[in-house]
Image: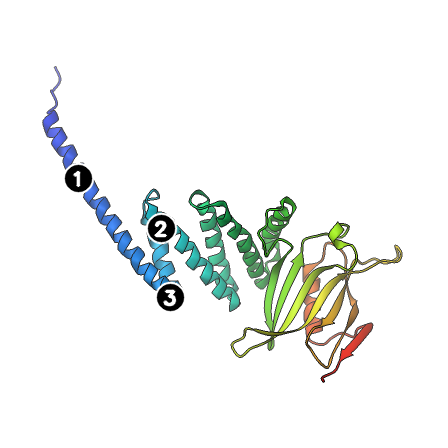
Amino acid sequence: MGVIPNYRKMNKITTLLLLTISIVSFGQTEIVNKQYQKADSLYQAENNIEAYKIFKEIEIQCDKKDTLYDYILWYYNATATLLEKEERSKQNWSNALEYGLESLELIKKGENYFDDKFQDRKYWMYKNLIVSYFGLNQLSNAKKYQKELYSAYKDKTLPDGIDHFYNFEFFKWKDKNIWAYEYYPELGAPETKGSFSKIEYYIYSTNADGSDNKELYRLLVLKFHKFDNSVKFDYVLTKRLITATDEVSGTLYDYTYTKPIDYDKLRKDIKEVLNGNYQPNTKSVIKKK
């Protein structure tokens, strides 16, 4: 005959174990709560980096079923996104990329916690990652996210503000800020009838803090209207003045492109024009008043 178990003793041990686990769990919850309050105070004080560190740490510790987890995940992503923006504005591309990839994973994780509008953030982060990859000259890595945007454009799922075009590059040139945007439609689409720019570079003067001041001119990768099949290019670079004075504008036939546009060639050409190495075939000059 086997030994008869002492259930009274076992129940007592089980109760003690459960009580111990509950106390430990309660203690961990209290620690997470206190850390969250600290991180929230740092966030409100705009100390994003220190708040981010705490949110990142307690996101792992917090019970995913606890309602507090929703808040932690939200603000963890918020601080990571803010840091990504800060690093990108400073052209610290490697840091911006790291925060961007992390934020993208948090946005995907948020699918189970937040409404569908929250997922619109992933498209903006795709755009940010593209800018960072261009800054790092890793154009092949940017392609993955460009394809994501184009696919969403075809499916009509892009949010307002990025549904017609997207920013793919930013850099500083001497005392100017350069912003590049690409439109989704391809030649032959209804949107490309008439005058159509596939890519536009916006050139801004800057304030003392380095922010945009006035838009000086644009460099447009403009659709070329072919008169016959002897023309072998699809686009021509064109300079269009906005507020710049004593500047020359016009069509730059030395810089032409076929579809799909070669980004490497385009970026080199843009820098040549920024350096003043061009002479428009058709031109106009705006003089100072």
In percent of width and height, residue 201 lies at: 67, 66
Does residue 144 sit above or below 90 in this rendering? above
In percent of width and height, residue 228 lies at: 89, 56
Whole-angstrom CA distance, mark 2 to mark 1, is: 25 Å
Q: Nearer the viewer, residue 100 or 136?
A: 100
Q: Residue at x 17, y 37 (%)?
A: 17
The secondary structure type at the circle numbered 3 is loop
Residue 255 position by quadrant: bottom right
Question: Residue lying furthest top in this view?
Answer: 1
Question: Residue lying furthest bottom in this view?
Answer: 289
Q: Nearer the viewer, residue 129 or 36?
A: 36
In percent of width and height, residue 179 lies at: 62, 66
Residue 4 position by quadrant: top left
Residue behind mark 1: 19
Relative side of 183 to 258, left or right = left
Q: Residue at x 75, y 67 (%)?
A: 238
The secondary structure type at the circle numbered 1 is helix
Residue behind mark 2: 59
Q: State the quadrant of the N terminus.
A: top left
Disc 3 residue type (three-letter): Asn
Does residue 243 sit above or below 289 in this rendering? above
- Judge the density around disc 1: few (<14), some (14-19), many (≥20) Cα neighbours within 10 Å: few
The secondary structure type at the circle numbered 2 is helix
Disc 2 residue type (three-letter): Glu
Whole-angstrom CA distance, mark 3 to mark 2, is: 18 Å
Residue behind mark 3: 47
Whole-angstrom CA distance, mark 1 to mark 3, is: 39 Å
Disc 1 residue type (three-letter): Leu
Give the mark, 3 or 2, whose residue is nearer the N terminus. Answer: 3
**Colour setup of the view:** rainbow
